[in-house]
Structure formats: C-alpha cells, structure tokens
Amino acid sequence: MSQPPLRKTARKVDIASLPQGFSGRFTAMGSPCELLCEAQTADEAGKLADIVATEAWRIEDKLSRYLTGNVIDKINTACGEPVNVDAETAHLLTFAATLHELSDGAFDITSGVLRRAWSFDGSDNIPTKQIVAELLPLLGWDKVSWESPTITLPAGMELDLGGIGKEYAVDRSVLLLQSETEIACLVNFGGDLAVTGAPTMRKAWTVGIESAAGKGTTTLIELRRGALATSGDARRFLEKDGIRYSHVLDPRTGWPVSNAASSITVAADTCTQAGMLSTLAMLKGAAAESFLDSQSEQHWCRR
C-alpha cells in the first residue's frame, strides 16, 4: 500500500456571518481560499464550506509535488520507470500536454525544477546564468513519454501541476455545490474563482482585480455566471537595477518571460478555461494583448 501524503498544516474552516450570507475560509494549495454563499444559517454555510474545503484538500493531497506518497510523488521518484495513473490524473496530464503544444513549449509542467534557481520573494537575488543553464537539461515535456494512462518521466525530472491545479479544484468544487444545493455560491482559491450562479441577495457578485504591483484594487467586476482567473506578479517577483522580474518563467530559457504583463484576468465559462487563457497570455510577453484580443472572452490586461 502506498504511503499517504504528509500534510504540513492543520486544516480547519472558519465560518463568518456577512451582511448577505456567510463566508467559509480555509487554506489549501498554498493559498487563502474562501466560499461566499447566500445560506440562511451558519450550519448550512458550514456544510457547503466543508464540501469545498474537502475537495480542495483532496486535490492538494493527490497532486501536490510537496507531499510524499501521492501520484505526483510516485511519478517523480520512479527513476525513469513507467507509471500508470488514474483517470483524473490522466485527464490533467493530457490537458497539460495540450497547453504545451498551444504555447509552443512555453507552458511546461516539468519546469518546477527552476525553483532551485529562482525564489520570487521581492528581493534582488537574481541567479547566475550558469545556475539556470545547469537546470535546463531537466526541463522539457517533449522528453516525457505520455500515452494515457502510462507516463515515463526521465530520471531527475519532476512534474508540477501547480499551473492548472487551483483552477481545476475551483471547477470541481463548483460542480459539487451545484449537485448539492441551489444556494448561490462563489468559490475563490487564491484569486481564481467561479460562481454556481447569479446571487439573489445582490445584483451580482462583485470581484476586485488587484492593480499592478499589488497597489490596491482599482477595477471592480460584476459577475453573475462563469469564472475569473488572474495571472500576474503582484506578490511574486524580483527587482534589481530598476528591472522587475516576473515569476512567469519561460522553460525554454529558464528566465522570466520578457515584457510580461503585470496582471492578466480573463472571464470564461469555467475557471480552467479562464486560467488557460490568462496563463497563455502571460507567456506571450509583449504579444499578450493581441493574443487576448483574438479570443472571444472578456479580459483585463495591465502593464
């Protein structure tokens, strides 16, 4: 029997009353998470928040590269041997492969090893070119053998599904809520969010987009359906000699994407779709706006 994942923090959900309903707040996937709902009682809100938190923690336990004993750890420690995965993991790997193709290799779930060189903590600690170059042989989805349900990852390489995990968890939580209740809910995992439907206690769900470099909220969006996802460097960046380095890395070079936008938010039917478009746009660098303009979804791009 495989070893269960090792959890790093205690898990709890805090329920609070709001002028129009309740909130349920917890931490998952390294992010503050919350459920806003138009429940009538704290007990009702607590049951809905437990559904969301339980699903978020399930996905984190299963897919986090920081935990041992899960499917990602099994793949990453297989030392080049083939690993068979379940249907849910296979779906996400195929989606990641599609994003890799659509981005011409700029989106790559093997690029997590670059964290050994880059730490986007707001400092001026820029790694040397040599340190980055030494990691490049460990990158590249094209080096991975993937034919569902079997994946073979070359020894020394790692998978990291962090680039799509939160959006997937949001969509999964929304589906579970919709099967459980007709109460209007908003699920927000670290700024990636979706709603179960239009609220009844207010005109719309009001969502704020944080301005460039995290200097306050300047744009309010009224959301009645669908989802929003944001990519940006408001909190994760480096800055040296007047140059701001975004945390969005190009795995083909190992360096931050040049001329990346400070923030890109996309509205779409699902959080996964919105996240896909915002991420692909960030990876386009200076061409982000033209890429977004070619799509049919509403978007907000800040430089």
Image (cartoon, helix red, strand yellow):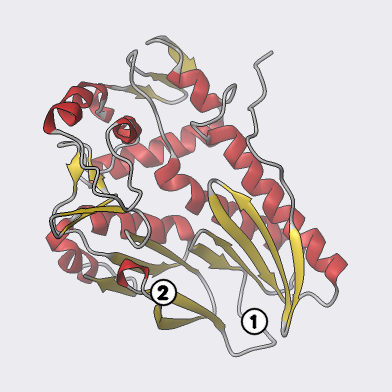
Give the amino acid at mark 1.
Pro
Give the amino acid at mark 2.
Ile
Q: Residue at x 25, y 59 (%)?
A: 281
Q: Residue at x 74, y 50 (%)?
A: 12
- Residue under label 1: 199
Helix, strand, or loop for circle 2?
Answer: strand
20 versus 189 height, above or below: below
72 versus 166 height, above or below: above
Q: Earlier in the sequence, mark 1 or mark 2?
A: 1
The picture places residue 199, in percent across and down from the top left corner, at 64, 81
Tag in front: 1 or 2: 2
Density class for disc 1 (Cα within 10 Å; few <14, some 14-19, many ≥20) is many
Q: CA distance from mark 1 to mark 2?
A: 20 Å
89 versus 47 height, above or below: above
Count of residue discs = 2
Helix, strand, or loop for circle 1?
Answer: loop
Mark on residue 209?
2
- Quarter of the figure with residue 186: bottom right
User: Does residue 85 appear in the picture of this structure?
Assistant: no
